[in-house]
């Protein structure tokens, strides 16, 4: 311990002795370690942390896998198709599945289910919309979650006809009710139904849905049908919707595979029961017959580890976060190479010291330990500064709100003991990485020449070779990052230049959900019309319209399109007729196209004659007309969305194509229908066209809605420009971060190149003096030094270009890099060429400065220099 303390004290003195070198090294390490720490804090919170519940490692989360021909009927949840097997993966189940699995839960100590519900919460004279969930009565007990105050739901609460009770999340209790303990026993209205708050869940537990989301209010699943005035909106109506996520807790000693195998029959039984209920409902309504399920189409139950809750969102963000982690890892490698070069340069001045210590009996291992102690000390100091950088980067450059949006509000990356432990380990590893090679080279000293005054070290050639190699690596790695930055910046610029097909300027958006408080049918339509007419009277407002969904919001509604010829086919086993194609639907107010600035190309738009009791008419976009009626005049053509109503819909107009879901997606075949003739919209987005800044109308908009319906909160109020920008969150994050880190890497590489050439000039001062004394011009000396530096640059650029090409090919197979880009290929020659030229120019400047200094050497002074 005494020896270690002695090494630390000596190391501090050596770092203070060369303050400039130490400052550059600390800044390099702090940037590299800080970036890695900040990103790891997000990776830890997003991908690694377990649920704050009892023994999360014993939890399992179920999903189903089935051939694509298998249909569940109505479905609400995540689903995707495995491209390798062509099987459909679904995360949700019908209520019947929960019932059968709980009856036969042998391998599980408990089975519980949960599903999201929309809630309008009215309390203390204020209304808002909250994220809600309906859960089975054993939800909290199975998870082992304790109440912060009051009590949590039990099986007794989850019975039909029971007293309506609710549990608040700790986060919602703090933000909505100010943490008032008197909330227990308080009555609140959920969708205009009185519920009693019985408790608040533990702090830190935000539910088992997707990471970053929080379930503000929890009710028993048996009370879900009571939330809706229109009972058909209930997930439990009729045969029921597949909408519940199901989890279980393994019995001690039982594996996930055993639980899956033993519950397979219970799951299949529930599937057959649900299908029988659908068959009965279809028969009663006179719909197409649903045949019995072919055994080849039987779905299978799959059990996955459930300690992190639902995984869909984690899997979505994982490739992007790991890619960014790789980027900051490269920055740290460049920083390590830079510091290693600085240490090699410093070691040149300590050669005599090491020779003397070796001559006095010190072992080479003892000197290596001393140098590694200094390196680790430097890295630990860099790690400490890195934590400060990490806080700035985490809360600024990569704040969750910048890339996760509103759906990630409960994700709070923190520099807790796990993250700080990562920083400590990273600092120690970094110190060893950049310190080992210089320590090994520096202590390889030939004693006789090293102890002579003015003698050159025999290791200078080796050190110069290692330094040059590190510079080549730095240039190559920085080019990798710059190429990535170029690709992502071009992607962002290309997306920002996309023509959305409508006027995004001076347009204010906001959402309302009157269906949650009992509005339906004609009453709902009247409310929308009343709000529109009142807002049109507000000074500065030019026009008001509304639609089922906002444009450029990743939201969409689509249906199968049936032309007359498609309806003559025989239904399949599900009672389905193969459609002519898919069409995106948009239910809108009559003036939607005019207000949004979407030009009408042919026919007419909607008018007062288009009412609920008149024949259905629609306006379609160019893509729809070209797909379903190529080389024909679409005006007057007919189609249907419902196979039981052939030719129900007539096309009366064709409008210009406009983007629907995002700037990146292709324009889909789109059908605009009048809200009076479409199914009632339980929620709507209002679009308010203003003469000036749309933000100036926000106060008036809130006032109008509050006067008409005090219990109707306004949601997601923003401009259309802001809405469009939200769809580019990840592209903007990648362009910003990769560019920033690439520029940092470039500067580090330039500093490394400058340092190596400056060291070479100092080592060759005597030689330069001889050359100049023998007649070499300053231009010759300048050319010699620049040429030596540019050789390293060219080698680094060549190595980097090859590495960039190979790496992009690998990333294409791993994360589908081309899907993250837009308007540019992963091996785009223009990007590669421009980046290579820019890096070469910067490197030339880094070479020119020490070379110019070399030309100012006085030959008489240089000849006496050793």
Image (cartoon, rainbow, N blue to C red):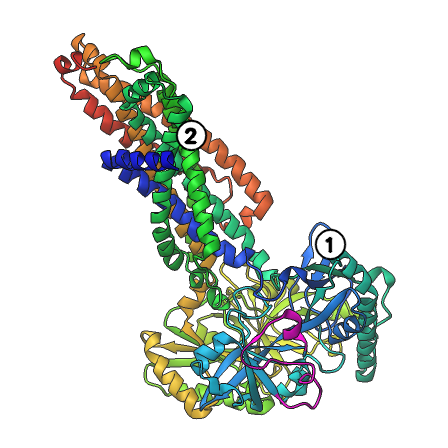
Q: Which residue is mark 1?
A: 86
Look at the image and give the residue range highlighted in magenta. 138-164
- Image coords of residue 718 (percent x, y): 41, 73
Q: Residues within 10 Å of mark 2 (few under 14, many from 20)?
A: some
Task: In the rendered structure, find residue 436 and report the number of the disc placed on it.
Answer: 2
- Work out whether residue 489 can be spotted: no
Instruction: Kindly report which numbered mark, 2 or 1, lies closer to the viewer in this rendering.
Output: 2
Q: Horizontally, is 778 left or right of 43 in the view?
A: left
Q: Which residue of the protein is positioned furthest toward the top in this rendering?
A: 774
> Residue 519 or 753: which is nearer the viewer?
753
Q: Earlier in the sequence, mark 2 or mark 1?
A: 1
Residue 469 in the image: above or below residue 739? above
Asked if the magenta segment contains residue 157, the reply would be yes
| Helix, strand or loop status at disc 1 | loop
Q: Residue at x 17, y 9 (%)?
A: 775
> Residue 83 or 432: which is nearer the viewer?
432
Asked if the magenta segment contains residue 679, the reply would be no
The quarter of the image holding the N terminus is top left
């Amino acid at each position: 311990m005494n020896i270690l303390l002695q090494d630390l004290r000596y190391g501090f003195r050596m770092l203070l002795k060369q303050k400039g070198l130490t400052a550059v090294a600390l800044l390099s390490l702090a940037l590299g370690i800080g970036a890695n720490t900040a990103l790891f804090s997000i990776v830890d919170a997003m991908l690694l942390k377990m649920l704050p519940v009892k023994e999360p490692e014993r939890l399992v989360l179920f999903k189903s896998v089935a051939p694509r021909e298998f249909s569940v009927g109505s479905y609400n949840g995540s689903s995707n198709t495995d491209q390798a097997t062509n099987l459909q993966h679904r995360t949700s189940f019908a209520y019947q599945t929960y019932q059968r699995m709980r009856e036969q839960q042998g391998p599980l100590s408990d089975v519980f289910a949960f599903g999201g519900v929309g809630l309008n919460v009215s309390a203390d004279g204020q209304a808002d919309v909250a994220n809600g969930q309906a859960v089975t009565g054993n939800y909290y007990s199975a998870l082992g979650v304790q109440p912060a105050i009051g009590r949590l739901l039990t099986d007794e609460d989850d019975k039909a006809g029971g007293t309506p009770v609710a549990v608040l999340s700790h986060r919602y209790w703090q933000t909505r009710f100010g943490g008032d303990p008197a909330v227990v026993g308080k009555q609140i209205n959920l969708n205009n139904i009185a519920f009693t708050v019985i408790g608040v869940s533990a702090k830190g537990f935000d539910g088992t849905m997707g990471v970053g989301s929080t379930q503000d209010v929890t009710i028993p699943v048996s009370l879900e049908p009571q939330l809706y005035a229109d009972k058909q909106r209930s997930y439990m109506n009729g045969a029921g919707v597949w909408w519940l996520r199901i989890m279980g807790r393994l019995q001690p000693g039982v594996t996930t595979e055993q639980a899956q195998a033993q519950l397979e029959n219970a799951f299949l039984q529930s599937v057959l029961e649900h299908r029988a209920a659908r068959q009965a409902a279809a028969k009663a309504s006179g719909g197409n017959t649903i045949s019995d399920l072919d055994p080849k189409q039987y779905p299978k139950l799959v059990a996955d580890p459930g300690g992190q809750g639902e995984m869909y969102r984690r899997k979505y963000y994982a490739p992007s976060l790991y890619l960014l982690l790789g980027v900051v890892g490269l920055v740290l490698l460049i920083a390590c190479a830079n510091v290693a070069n600085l240490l090699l340069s410093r070691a040149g001045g300590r050669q005599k010291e090491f020779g003397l210590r070796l001559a006095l009996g010190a072992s080479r291992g003892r000197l290596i330990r001393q140098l590694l102690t200094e390196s680790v000390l430097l890295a630990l100091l860099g790690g400490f500064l890195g934590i400060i950088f990490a806080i700035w980067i985490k809360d600024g450059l990569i704040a969750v709100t910048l890339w996760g949006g509103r759906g990630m509000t409960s994700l709070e990356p923190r520099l807790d003991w796990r993250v700080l432990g990562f920083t400590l380990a990273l600092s120690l590893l970094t110190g060893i990485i950049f310190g080992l090679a210089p320590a090994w080279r520096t202590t390889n000293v030939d004693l006789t020449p090293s102890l002579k005054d003015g003698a050159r070290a025999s290791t200078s050639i080796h050190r110069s070779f290692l330094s040059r190699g590190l510079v080549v690596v730095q240039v190559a790695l920085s080019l990798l990052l710059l190429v990535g930055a170029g690709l992502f910046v071009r992607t962002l610029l290309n997306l920002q230049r996309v023509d959305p097909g409508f006027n995004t300027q001076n347009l204010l958006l906001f959402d309302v959900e009157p269906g949650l408080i009992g509005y339906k049918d004609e009453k709902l339509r009247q409310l929308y019309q009343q709000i529109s007419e009142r807002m049109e009277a507000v000074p500065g407002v030019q026009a008001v319209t509304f639609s089922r969904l906002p444009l450029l919001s990743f939201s969409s509604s689509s249906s199968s399109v049936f032309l007359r010829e498609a309806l003559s086919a025989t239904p399949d086993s599900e009672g389905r007729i193969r459609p002519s194609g898919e069409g995106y639907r948009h239910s809108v107010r009559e003036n939607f196209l005019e207000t949004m600035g979407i030009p009408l190309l042919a026919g007419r738009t909607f008018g007062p004659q288009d009412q609920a009791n008149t024949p259905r008419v629609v306006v379609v976009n160019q893509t729809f007309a070209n797909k379903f009626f190529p080389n024909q005049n679409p005006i007057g053509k007919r189609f249907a969305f419902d196979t039981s109503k052939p030719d129900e819909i007539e096309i009366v107009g064709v409008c210009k194509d406009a983007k629907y879901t995002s700037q990146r997606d292709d324009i889909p075949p789109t059908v605009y229908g009048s809200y009076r003739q479409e199914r009632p919209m339980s929620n709507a987005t209002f679009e308010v066209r203003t003469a000036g800044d749309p933000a100036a109308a926000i106060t008036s908009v809130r006032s109008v809605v509050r006067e008409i319906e005090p219990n109707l909160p306004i949601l997601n109020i923003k401009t259309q420009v802001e809405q469009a920008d939200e769809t580019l969150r990840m592209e903007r994050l990648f362009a910003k971060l990769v560019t920033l880190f690439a520029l940092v890497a470039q500067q580090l590489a330039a500093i490394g190149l400058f340092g190596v050439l400056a060291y070479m000039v100092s080592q060759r001062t005597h030689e330069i003096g001889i050359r100049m004394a023998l007649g070499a011009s300053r231009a010759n000396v300048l050319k010699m030094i620049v040429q030596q530096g540019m050789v390293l640059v060219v080698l680094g650029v060549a190595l980097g270009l090859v590495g960039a090409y190979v790496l992009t090919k690998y990333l294409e197979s791993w994360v589908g890099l081309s899907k993250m880009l837009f308007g540019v290929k992963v091996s785009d020659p223009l990007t590669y060429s421009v980046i290579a030229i820019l890096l070469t120019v910067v490197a030339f400047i880094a070479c020119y400065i020490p070379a110019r200094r070399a030309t100012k050497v006085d030959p008489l002074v240089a000849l006496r220099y050793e």
